[in-house]
Structure formats: structure tokens, C-alpha cells
Image: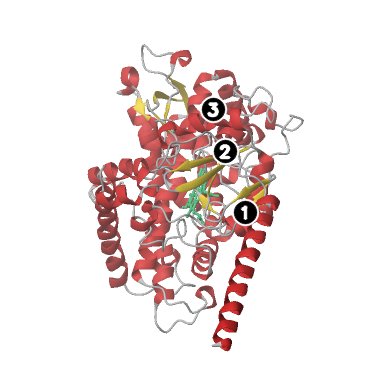
Amino acid sequence: MASLLLLLTILLISTIFIIFMISISNKKNKTNKAPLPPGPKGWPIIGNLNQIGSKPHETLHTLSKIYGPLYRLQLGSVTVVVANSPDVASQFLRTLDTNFCNRPQFTIGEYMGYGYRAPGSMPYGPGWLMFRRLCNIHLFSNKALDDLRHVREEEVSLLARKFVQAKDTSITVGVEVGKELNACAANALTRALFRRRVFEEDNGPDVEEFKKVLEENLKLATGLNIEDFFPWIKALDVRGFVAKLKRLHRWYDNTLTKIIDEHKSKPKIAIEGEAEGKDLLSVLLRLKDADVKDKETDNYKLTDTDIKALLTDLFIGGTDTTSLMVEWALVELIRHPDILAAAQKELDSIVGQSRLVSELDLSDIPLLEAIIKETFRLHPPVPHLIPHTASEACEVAGYYVPKATVLLVNVWTICRDPEVWSRPMEFDPSRFLPGGENADVDVKGSHFELIPFGAGRRICLGMRLGMRMTTLLLASLVHGFDWALPDGLSPENMNMDVEYGLTLERIVPLVARPIPRLAPNAYVV
Ligand code: HEM
């Protein structure tokens, strides 16, 4: 009996001791822990979701004026922090990069990323590193990019030719420039990925359907989908969002399965052999071969699903971003004819007027480069990057950021912050010219005031191709054509509104008249 009493007493004392220790440690945590970032008060259950509105980039921008460089939103069950200054962005993406190099598991990655097996949605780890390494060697290295220079140049000359042919019919109506740019960027990319032009009218997979799919792509891929914040809405699929994603995924999957089968049925071409064996799909199929023990894959056994996930991601990541960017640059140049004329003069002095631009002409074009940077600044194609997530709780800028918090880097706001840029709303490329106030700033991820491709480990995988294609396309359109608006439209009253998505698209697409300005045989392909 006495020993039972003793045992109970010991148990009681230890329980009290444990409770005491936990409460001390909680108190200590509470007092030592930095406060959560400030943010607007939310409603029970939905949090701040009802305050986001239909133009989240504008809402997030307005909130930055109230709550400063780092604020917090509660969107349903998910805590989101928004970084609004170069300094805070660099704390997340440079100082704490290892903690923020994961992606939240959002619905889009579940379907379009084949269950988070594509590089854009995949968790950080060996599989993700392997995909990036493969792409960096076989698609985006300088050598791989040089090998495919002719492909990009051919596609851009075909576009120029199309614009020349359109000149008579477009006098009153103009051409829908963004759509043509999109097809051009898509064809150049898919020729590098699997040697096919997806927009070839009589050869590609059902072209009309493909165009619709492309349009649907990024509308669905917005950074802020309600389904990601309320699992029950996703389960019930109230908006039909999941059904649409599944349909889109099925389309990609069927199309890519056909393309892969076609490639497999062709005789295998050694990787060091003819150039045509060097498209990314041929390389991936060779690496997938059971006999290949390759350090590039760390002997990871690639599957057809991995390959389809990668191709889908590269295609989605590489088309709209590029064409949107060039469309915005052209809009700004039409609104600033003096800058357009100066850029034409710069290119004429290098290329002349008897041929189209080649990528080889584009090593010393300070004004065009400045125009590209200024366009990235005022119209960053991906306004909040792709969401990142905190692997562990941490402290940033004196605030506590809990584990699993979703991070949005508000590039859109940073790029128009008057504390960072003088005359931020003015399109003025001269700020980036030698001697200009921002001459040293580049877009490659080390100057956090201008990170249209992101920064750190998750920086855009296709940045080098994106830059090459953007520069070639814009140079060709500027050098090859004068640009006018259809009758009745003036540069001053162009609609500049955007539709929010993962990328910011123009609500009213640019319709313009290309007027050839080179010798007629310059456009002959
Ligand atoms: C003007 C052109 C482009 C812009 C502005 C752009 C922008 C971006 C941005 C902002 C991100 C997210 C970075 C982050 O979350 O920190 C990203 C990621 C990505 N981009 Fe691009 N991009 C462009 C072109 C391309 C091209 C040409 C490709 C491929 C062919 C591509 C493939 C990807 C992929 C796969 C990712 C995901 C990377 C990862 O999560 O590891 N992008 N891009």
C-alpha cells in the first residue's frame, strides 16, 4: 500500500513538474518570439479572403502602403506573407533561401504537375535538382542555346513574313500581336523540346483546340485560387475548377503521349550524333533507357510520367511569359515613338536595312536592353513570383513567420515603389543606360529591386532562353517594322488594364498595324 502511495505521489509530482516546465517554455517562447507580421483583420474561417477582390495585385499593392514591407494575410486555413521591399525579398530569397525553396502543394501542381513531379511544383530535393541539371545542360547551356539559334531565328523570320503579308489586310483592323507572338514563342520552344511546331496549321495537334488550351492554361494557374485555401471547396469542386484542370491535364497528357510514342518509334540517335537527336525529348528518352547509368540522373530511373511532367512545365513556363513581355514592350514603344525611333536607329547601325536581325547582332545594344529592363520593371509578367513556402518557422525583418507559411514576393509593388525608383510610373529606359541612375541593375536575380525571374534556388529555370527569345523577338519587331494603331485608336487612349493570373495579361490585347521598313527582300525566308 505504502509503495503504491509513493508511486502515485511520484507520478503526481512528475506530472506537475512536466506541466510547469511546458508552461515555462511556452511563456518563454511567447515572450522571446517576435510578433507576427502586421496585416488586415480578417473574418472567422475565411480570414482575409473576401478582401482580395478581382485584382489581387492591386489589393496587395494597396495593403503594402498600409502595412509596410512585410505583412500577413490569413486566407482560409493558410497563412500568407507578402514581401514588398527589395530588402525583405532578399531576406527571404537570399538569406533564408534554403528555408523558402519549397513550393506549397497547390491544386495546379497536383494536376498540371502530375502530382508535384514537375520542376515548378516539385519539393526541393534530388529529383528537382536532377531536372534542373538536365535542363541546364541540354536546353539552357550556352552551347545548347547556340545550337538552336537557327530555330529561334527561323520562327521569328516566319513571324516577320506573316506581318508583311498582313500589311494590306491590316490597314484598318490591325493584327492581334500578342497571339502571333505567343504562337511564335510556342513553336520555337516545342521545336527545342521535341522537334515539332505545335502551331503548324496542318501538322500540329489540333491547332484550334490547342489555342483554346493555351488560353485556359494561365487563367487557371492564378497564384491565388480559393480551392487552395479551403480543402472542402476543392473536395466539392464548387467552381468546377478541379474538373477544368483535369480536362486540361488530360489534353496535355494525351498530346504528349502521342509525341513520345512517335519519338520512340524513330530509330534512336546517339546523343553525340546528328543535331536532330539533341532535342530535349530525345535526350530524356535516351537517359530513360534501362542500360544507361548516367551521372546526369544520379541513376534515377526516369519514367514517361516524369518526362511528360517536365515537358508540360517547360511549355507552360516558357510561352506566355515571353510573348506577354514582348507585347508589353511594344505597347510602351507605340506610346513612346521617340524611344521606338531611337531603338530602330540603334539596330539599323548594326544590322542595316537589307536583312532581319540575327541573335549574333545582339551583343551591344544598350538601348534595347534598357527597354527590356524597363518593361520588366513596369510590367513584370509574373507579378508575385510562384508561391514559395516556409519549411520551418523563422524570423524575418523582426517578425515571426510560422512553418508552412506561404510566401508571395510582390515584385509588382517593389518595381513601382517611389522609395526604390525615381518617377516609378514613367516608362523611361534611360535609367538603365550607361550613366543612368540604375545602370548597374540587371534582372538576373541579384538586384532585388528588379527580379522578374525570381531569385535564389527557385529562380526561373528558363531565364537564359527567356532572355534570348525576348531580345530577338523585340529586336526583330522594332527593326523590321514601324507600328501604328488601327483607325480610331490613339496611343494616349490605349487600354492598359490587366487581368490577374499567374501572369498579368492585357484585358484588351494589343492590335496594331505592322508597317515594313526594310528592303522587301529582307523578309524573304
Ligand atoms: C520572359 C520570360 C520569363 C519570365 C519573366 C519568367 C519568370 C519566372 C518566374 C518569376 C518564376 C518563379 C520564380 C520564383 O518563384 O522564385 C519562374 C519559374 C519557372 N520558369 Fe520562368 N520565366 C520566363 C521564361 C521561362 C522559359 C522560357 C521557361 C522554359 C522553357 C521557363 C520555365 C520555368 C520553370 C520550369 C519555372 C519553375 C522553376 C522552379 O520552381 O524550380 N520560364 N519563371
The answer to whether the beta carbon of the residue marked 1 is less than 8 Å from any atom of ligand 1 is: yes
Q: Nearer the viewer, mark 1 or mark 3?
A: 3
Q: Secondary structure at mark 2?
A: helix
Q: Determine which residue is flagged by label 3.
A: 62
Q: Earlier in the sequence, mark 2 or mark 3?
A: 3
Residue 68 percent coordinates (x, y): 63, 33
Using residue 255 as the reference point, say whether residue 352 is left or right of it.
right
Q: Secondary structure at mark 1?
A: helix
**Of the pair 11 and 485, the residue shown nearer to us:** 11
- Residue 449 falls in image quadrant: top right
Residue sitting at x 51%, y 34%: 41
Residue found at the very far front of the displayed protein:
1
Name of the residue lying farthest toward the right? 435
Q: Position of residue 401 (x, y in %)?
A: 60, 50
Quarter-wise, where is residue 451 in the image?
A: top right
Q: Is mark 2 within 8 Å of ligand 1?
A: yes
Compared with residue 78, is residue 510 higher up or lower down, i.e. above or below? above
Residue 129: numbered disc: none
Asked whether 383 or 240 is in front, the reply is 240
Sequence-wise, the earlier of marks 1 and 3 is: 3
Left or right relative to 88: residue 352: left
- Examine the rendered structure and indicate whether residue 388 appears above or below residue 4: above
Which residue sits at x=39%, y=59%? 311
- Tag 1: residue type? Gly
Q: Quadrant of the N terminus?
A: bottom right
**Disc 1 from disc 2: Cα separation:** 14 Å
> Label 2, on which residue?
411
Q: State the quadrant of the C terminus.
A: top left
